[in-house]
Image (tube, grey):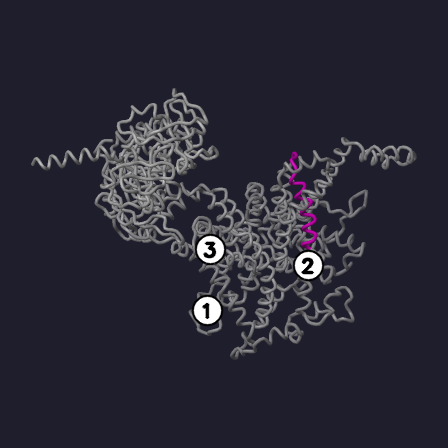
Amino acid sequence: MARVSLSNVTKRYEDVVAVDEMNLDIKDGEFVCFVGPSGCGKSTTMETIAGLTKPSEGTIRIGETDVTKLPPKDRGVSMVFQNIALFPHMDVYENISFGLRLRKYDQDEIDRRVDNASEIVQLEGMLDREPNELSGGQQQRVAIARAIVRNPDVFLMDEPLANLDAKLRVHMRTELQRLHKQLDTTIIYVTHDQAEAMTMSDRIAVLNAGQLQQIDPPLVCYNEPANLFVAGFIGSPSMNFTDGELVDGGLTTEHYDIEFDTTELGISPGDEITAGVRPEDIYLTRNEDEVDSPSEVIEATTDVLEPMGDEIFVYLSLDGTSGSSMTSDEAAGASNQLLMSVDPDTEIDEDESVSIVLDRSKIHLFDTASGDALAHGIVDLSEAERTRAAAESRGQHE
Amino acid sequence: MSTEQEADTADRESRRSGPLVAVTRWLENLGETAFAYLLLTPVFVILGAIALYPLLRTFELSMYVNVLGTGDPEFVGLQNYVDMFTGARDPDFPGSTMFLPDVSTSSSFPFVHVSGWFRSALVVTLVFTIVSVFFETVIGFGQALILDQEFRGRRLVRVAIIIPWAIPLVIQGMIFYLMFHPSTGFLTEYLANVGILAPTNTLNDPLSALIIVTIADIWKTTAFMALLILAGLQSVDRSLYEVARVAGASRWQQFKLITLPLVLPAVAIAVLFRTIDAMRIYGLIDITASCTVVPSLSCMVVETFNTHRGLASAIAFVTAGIIGILAMIVIYRQYKEGF
Amino acid sequence: MATTTEQRSDSEDAEDGVIAQWTKGVIGDDEKRARLYRALFYVACGFFLVTTLFPFYWLLVLALTPNSQILTGDWSLPVIGIEFPHPQGFNPQAFVEVFQQIPFHLYVFNSFVLATVTTIIVLLVASLAGYVFGRLDFPGKGPLMLGVLMVSYFPPAAFLIPLFDAFLGNAIVVPFLGIELFEPPRLVNTPGSMIMPFSALFLPLAIFILTTFYAQIPDGLEDAARVEGTTRLGALFRVIMPLSAPGVATAAVLTFIAVYNEYFFSSIMALENVPENWSPLVGGILSYQDQYTTDFNLMAAASIVGVIPILILVIVAQERIVSGLTAGGLKE
């Protein structure tokens, strides 16, 4: 068990920078997920930790040891691969004990450890099977047993569930969490599936274009995304973004204005900002009382409805044009579209004119140019004035 | 897991030392390019020493005379090459009277009536190559079509077809030597009766010997052709035949419209491969007939290298050059397709 | 199409012979046509079987016929009188004499040693190269592969002279500079003088076969082996090679056969055809031709003995040979 830290790790290939100045500190016993779109550098980062790829610059430490120049076998890591990577010419026992045999452990010790590991992943009685006689889930268990049998400092898991079917994937998720609880070893987990990242990890590291965007607990990434990329990547369906301009006392966009206290933002009127709001933070005016601090009313027309069972996704058009050919993600990014989710029993029809409000406390503001988050939740002007007045009066009293 | 178990920690592993560990670490830390070139070193050494060095040295030697003599070798530039083409050094070739028939006396070997034994060798090599590759392609195609079918005994037929390919050259040569030897052979008489072979002294008659060598080569190497063409046949999408059958194509039409055009590229490569290989003919001639009766380019080199090394080098280099040009065609094709 | 032909032929050619009638029937009748194809197929099959196997029958006839009978040169079959080789008398003694006349087994043994050692060297070197070409990406890869390919096309005669010089113990000279590097040991009449050229000659094919096979092993398996506790080279020998066993076997069989069958260097590098000079099979068989010219039955018997190992190898490994030749040839 050990902490893993990357400082200034950069991996350049001839024409691309796969990992760009990555700084990362993973605590002992932590379960960290690397998420990001394909090609974001998450797998390359993991390979540099495993030693399968050597960084062009930077250092990697596992525990107190600088492992940057150590071969993979000497790093005290074990790894589970996306394509499972069991050796087809060895049976289950031989696969699990491969690393131990290479390290010339006593036969007794090997047997004891293999038994222990196979018990943990519930593979007892299958040790003499060939990998191709096992189901996908069983093969993945063997791969995990092979990883845990050596008692490594760090487990690296590179999309280990990606090749399993949906049902098994959900099941294996809980198995992995149980395993983490049982072993208490540092786990670094690469996935492109944010549901996996959200449900399993202590912290999520969101990567894009080789750069670390944010590393925080799942809910922090969800509620307080550090920038536009994280805001758009975490959450499904994606957050709605509207480009606008900061004016004195509020935000103005092509289709709606919101007044709020701009004094705390640290930018000046005239700057371009992007407002983001998640589908579940948009309400019909008739349900306005569910929101503590509703925004101004926005008029819209419903376009397409997607009943999901536990909720309905409503595509709203702000200028009357139809965007039904877009996917939900595209709709969320288009400035004349909003995606709203409502309760499944809401009475709503397509092509209906509706009034909506946004939950002010859930509106995110980003600097359009840099993408950095400016605020998570904005304060009503009147409320702000009240608070300020109260503060002033308190100040006067003192 | 229980704590008394030894964990594979980076800390523990990194403290391992010793020369072996150091070498391993160094190897593992080599970049991909450095590692690749390191692993290729044995190939470079072997091919460099056994192929590249001899090739360059051959070229150098080809510009000298008196390489083996008592005095110092004398640099003559390209004179050996000139002599080779003009025939000025014909007397240097042992047994030259045997295979260099006088224009006026020999009617059985028309293509050497041009002057110079080098030209004879060139003609022998080219004629052998063209004739043997032609028959090997045609017969090999037939064999491939048979092997492409599913039938009982297919394995047996396949073994029978491959076996000649696997026969040691010396035994292949011996078979045909015995088959056409005046004391043992029975085939000479039949073939002489139809005018293909000379009735007496057959293996010493240049044209007859060339024919026998060609037959022997066809017997052995057709299998190679057949296997390459078979691979081409088996890569043809079977559903195309279904489509053709539904469209009412007869077997012959299916062959002409689907099999032939789709297999032709494979046949073309096979022909190139075989051509390059056939141009190197030496051993079969040496055993069955004799290099002095049927001179091929490689024969020339072997026959002269112990007496006239500079001249032999010139022949060797020209042989390599001719084959090299052919090989370039193959390689250019491979290069275009990418690796 | 078929119907019109038939009608016409029925009316016009009533007096035609049986064969013509049958032919026309075949053209019109699908089932008969299929039968014709099948008949043609078996005829062709039989033809190829006879032409490829007949020479072996010929060897057997020669070996079993006493030499005195062979020398009469009379192969007339009894009764019919047609010339056709058939055993005249039965003299299996020839197969024993083969070993008594000269130590033929020693030549075969030499061939086995040369083929085995060459195969091992080629497999090792080609495995490293196959790993590099099949699994690594680096500048200069394409041209290097082409260079290796090029070597396999050159005639052995192009390499002979300087190699022979060097194996005689003459100094290695840097071409065109005249600088003498060192005097190599005298290698003629030793296995080295044959194993070295064999290795160079047959290395390219093995490299291409192994490159194809090694490239197909998923990257994950190599990575897994490395993380589990071995190096890149360890992964090659513990995981990639065992998983490519068919490819390795193919390369091994083809190299072995190629060396066993080689003639050019085999006949030149042993200066005399005696087993003490590491003269291989080639030397053994040629000594019958050279010294015992009249013992045709022994030449045939020796050839049969020399063919047997290859025959067994071909029958056992025919799948490998077929796949290897086509993979090496077409490089798919």
From the viewer's perspective, tell me whether residue A263 is left or right of residue C285: left
- Count residues near mark 1 (Cα–Cα under 10 Å), then give few for <14, some for 14-19, many for 20+: many
- Count residues near mark 2 (Cα–Cα under 10 Å), then give few for <14, some for 14-19, many for 20+: many
Q: SS class of the residue under badge 1?
A: loop
Region in magenta: B132-152
| Disc marking residue B128 | 2
Marks 2 and 1, how far apart in space? 36 Å
Question: Image quarter for residue B96?
Answer: bottom right
The residue type indicated by label 2 comes to: Phe
Camera sees residue A150: no
From the viewer's perspective, tell me whether residue B275 is left or right of residue C331: right
- Count residues near mark 3 (Cα–Cα under 10 Å), then give few for <14, some for 14-19, many for 20+: some
| Disc marking residue C141 | 3
Viewer-nearest of labels 3 and 2?
A: 3
Marks 1 and 3, how far apart in space? 30 Å
Q: Quadrant of the C terminus of chain A?
A: top left
Q: What is the x, y in percent for residue B86?
A: 67, 74
Camera sees residue A271: yes
Viewer-nearest of labels 2 and 1?
A: 2
The chain containing the residue under callout 2 comes to: B
Q: Which residue is mark 1?
A: C172
Residue, far left: A398
| Disc marking residue A16 | none
The chain containing the residue under callout 3 comes to: C
Q: Quadrant of the N terminus of chain A?
A: top left
